[in-house]
Amino acid sequence: MQLFRAIPSSRLAEAEQGLRRQSSIRVPRNVPYVVDNLWESLRPKNMPSRRHAIYASPTAELALQNASAPLADGDEYVPCRVVVDPRDIRVAQLQVKDARYHSDIRLVGNWVSQRGQVFADLSLTQKQKVAQLFLPGLHRGELTALWKNDPLIAEFCSYARQNLTLWSSASSVPQASDGELFFELLGDLQTYRLEAL
């Protein structure tokens, strides 16, 4: 299994020495927080967390197409091979080019919209409890606690568990497709290297 990333040429020396893992939680810009919270709570142990992931591509060409880091004057993107032992990472590849296009987002939005009047009729205290689902970066335990203490949240989480497909449709073996691909470093491993092609 080979993984590739494209980075600005000004970062090559740093990347050859080793880039650090994402230690803090990355909240999504392209996925609603409620969906991100559900995905993280439903994530199987053999799949990487999107919140700590490093995004990559299965080919150098796709890495160049997907490059998005800001370029300084005179910079250009350089395709690189990810240098890391495959036993030290978890990989997931989606069937969509970007998670923002995943059908789970529409499913969650539809479920909430269909219950609009139910949400509107809640007391302020109940609304504040349900609103926590929509905060960024909920941990699995926090979502479980909400689920156990509120029937509407329990109904919502049960629906999500039965219908969301992000993880069941993701592959742990990279394919030569443009599906979003990401990996997470395991254990105490703090860095990975990139080797320019």
Image (tube, helix red, strand yellow):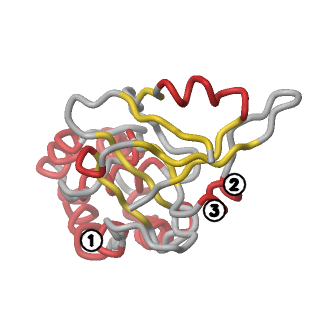
Residue 94: horizontal and vertical position, in percent?
Answer: 44, 68
Q: Give the residue displayed 42% in from the left and 66% down from the top.
A: 108
Residue 174: horizontal and vertical position, in percent?
Answer: 41, 67
Q: Name the residue tied to disc 2.
A: 64
Q: How far apart are the alpha carbons under marks 2 and 1?
A: 38 Å
Q: Who comes first in sequence, dot 3 or dot 1?
A: 3
Viewer-nearest of labels 2 and 1?
Answer: 2
Q: Name the residue tied to disc 3.
A: 62
Looking at the image, the residue that sits furthest to the front is: 197
SS of the residue under disc 3: helix
Q: Say which mark, if any, is on residue 159.
A: 1
Using the rendered view, name the quadrant where residue 142 is placed. Answer: top left
Using the rendered view, name the quadrant where residue 165 is placed. Answer: bottom left
Label 2–label 3 contact, CB within 8 A: yes
Q: Is residue 124 above or below residue 115?
A: above
Q: Is residue 68 above or below residue 111?
A: above
Viewer-nearest of labels 3 and 1?
Answer: 3
SS of the residue under disc 2: helix
